[in-house]
Structure formats: C-alpha cells, structure tokens
Image (tube, grey):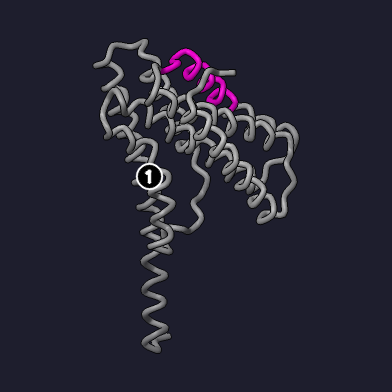
Amino acid sequence: MLGLSDAGWVVGLVCAAVTTTAVLRGLSRYDHALGPADLVTLTRAMLACAVAALVADAFVEPPAVTVLVGISVVALALDAVDGWVARWTGTASAFGARFDGEADAFLMLVLSVYVARSFGIWVLAIGLARYVFGAAGWVLPWMAAQLPPRYWRKVVAATQGVVLVVAASGVAPAPVSYAALVFALALLVESFGRDVLWLWRRRRPATREARALAAGTP
C-alpha cells in the first residue's frame, strides 16, 4: 500500500511484532489493562514502526520524505494527547509512563538513523542516549534507581523530536539544521548528565553505609 521495498516491509513488521510482544509482557508485569491513554500511546508506537519501515526503505529506494515527516509529526503531536487523556480519565499508571517513554525513545532512534544519513553518524547519539542510559543500569545498579519526575525531560524530548523532524524534512538550510541538531544534542547531554549526577549523589551514602556495616561499625 505504501509502495515499500522488501526491506521496508520486513523492518516495519518486525518492529510491530516486537512492540506488540513488549506491550503484552509489560501488561503482565505491571498487572495492568490497556486504558484509553495507553491506546493513544500504542498508536504512537505503531506510527514509529511505520517511520522505521520508511527509514529502512530509504536505504534502498528514494526516500518518501513527505510521508515520513507527516507520520512523524502526527506521532509527536499524539505525545501530548496521551498524557492529557490519562489525566482527564484518571488512568495514569506506571505502565503508561514507561510505555510513553519507550515510544518516544524508539521514534527518536529511527528519526536519528534517517537524519544521520545527511548530517553524520554523530546524530545517532540523539537516538541512542536513552538506550545507553538504560544499559548502564545493568552494569551499574545505582544507575537503575527510580528517578524523580522532572518536566524538563519532556521539554528536552519534545525538542529532539521537533529538531529531528525539521532536519529530516529538509525545509531549513543545512547549516541551520546542523546547528539545531548540535543544540538538541547539548540539551540531551545536560538532561542525562543531571540525572546521572542525581543518581551518583544518592549512591555514595548507600555505599558508605554498606562499608560501615561490613566493617562492623554502628
């Protein structure tokens, strides 16, 4: 229907299958049923899968820039809708918050892959940051601690999305898009850096306490 290549179809269907499996596992883990806000987030996640298919297709055929940008804009717009629906219906949940973050992260990743084709591989840092942060928690347990809510994270995430879409569309001159991407990456480094520092500062007292207990000190 979208005139995708075989690579595009494979990537799109695999992403949709992985997303569906992850959602089902998450619902079981959190003992949660899909609510109205979750359905909006699921729509965003499937739109991100469509963007992933178009990005894969762009490596073997001329990119469908208009369609890719259009779907991305809708997905970004729905990012504000699911939170509003959750508050309006009183169905906010830990599952919904996690699902929302993962949907955002995946869309940023696939957009950064597309934009990196024109602006350099360094743009992938924008899309990979969330996954590197999560992987660090497997190696450093203190990095996996629960972070407090912070509105600035949403602002930074929205900025990444807007900048990546503008860069993908090609509507702005290349130097302007390049500067915007550098600025977006700097915001991301600042945001993740602040979270890492917060986690580190709360890790050290726990470490001293553990050492004291090991030494038999009250």
Residue 61 position in % (x across, y down): 40, 20
Identify which amino acid the numbered label 1 is placed on.
Answer: Phe
> Quick check: 44 above or below 195?
above
Residue 2 makes an appearance in the image: yes
Residue 23 sits in quarter: top right
Residue 175 sits in quarter: top left
Q: Residue furthest bottom?
A: 216
> Quick check: 126 above or below 131?
above
Residue 48 makes an appearance in the image: no
Residue 216 position in % (x across, y down): 40, 89
Q: Nearer the viewer, residue 17 or 115?
A: 17
**65 falls in the magenta region:** yes
Q: Residue furthest front?
A: 6
Residue 192 position in % (x across, y down): 37, 44
Residue 79 position in % (x across, y down): 57, 29
Q: The N terminus is located in which quarter?
A: top right
Is disc 1 surrounded by few (<14), some (14 to 19) or many (20+) residues within 10 Å? some
Instruction: Give the residues in magenta.
Output: 63-78
